[in-house]
Image (tube, grey):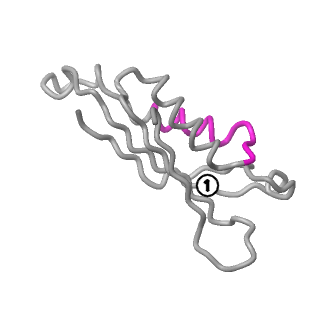
Amino acid sequence: MYTITMKNCAFFGRHGVHDEEEMLGQRFYVDARLTIDAGDALEGDSIKGTVDYGVAFKVIEKIVTGERRFLIEALAHDVARTMVETFPEIARAEVTIRKPNAPVPGVLDYVEVSVAWPR
């Protein structure tokens, strides 16, 4: 087993409970930690049998920029589950999503949620 980590992938989305969040949208940041079953990829030094992280990035992008989720928890769950379902080499996906402009009555850097699949 080995791990591919994609950090701070940035996408524009329209997620959140409030109507203004859908209307205005905002940037979301995604970290994906993918645990890979090595198979022959490491010994063979070949992209076959591993995860092409350019393709993985596009899968994440499609989800985050697509259908609105009210909860970033649900968004992170969808990303993690889809990664495992899309790439048979992924044994586990841990996904963290940061929302820097969360509508809270105070000052903070961001709200962050992490989800793993399978659980």
Report the front residue among 73 and 51: 73
The residue positioned 37% from the left and 38% from the top of the image is 34
Mark count? 1
According to the image, label 1 marks what residue? Answer: 28
Report the front residue among 38 and 52: 38
Q: Quadrant of the N terminus?
A: top left
Local SS, label 1: strand
- Left or right: residue 58 versus residue 102 is left
The residue positioned 42% from the left and 24% from the top of the image is 87
Q: Is residue 45 above or below residue 14?
A: above
Magenta stretch: residue 63 in it? Answer: yes
Query: How far across and how far down the image is residue 81, in percent?
Result: 52, 31
Residue lying farthest to the front in this orientation: 119
**Which image quarter: residue 37?**
top left
Q: Which residues are magenta?
A: 55-70
**Which image quarter: residue 60?**
top right
- Left or right: residue 2 versus residue 79 is left
Query: How far across and how far down the image is residue 45, in percent?
Result: 17, 27
Magenta stretch: residue 26 in it? Answer: no
Q: Is residue 32 above or below residue 51?
A: below
The residue positioned 57% from the left and 58% from the top of the image is 98
Query: How far across and how far down the image is residue 11, in percent?
Result: 60, 49
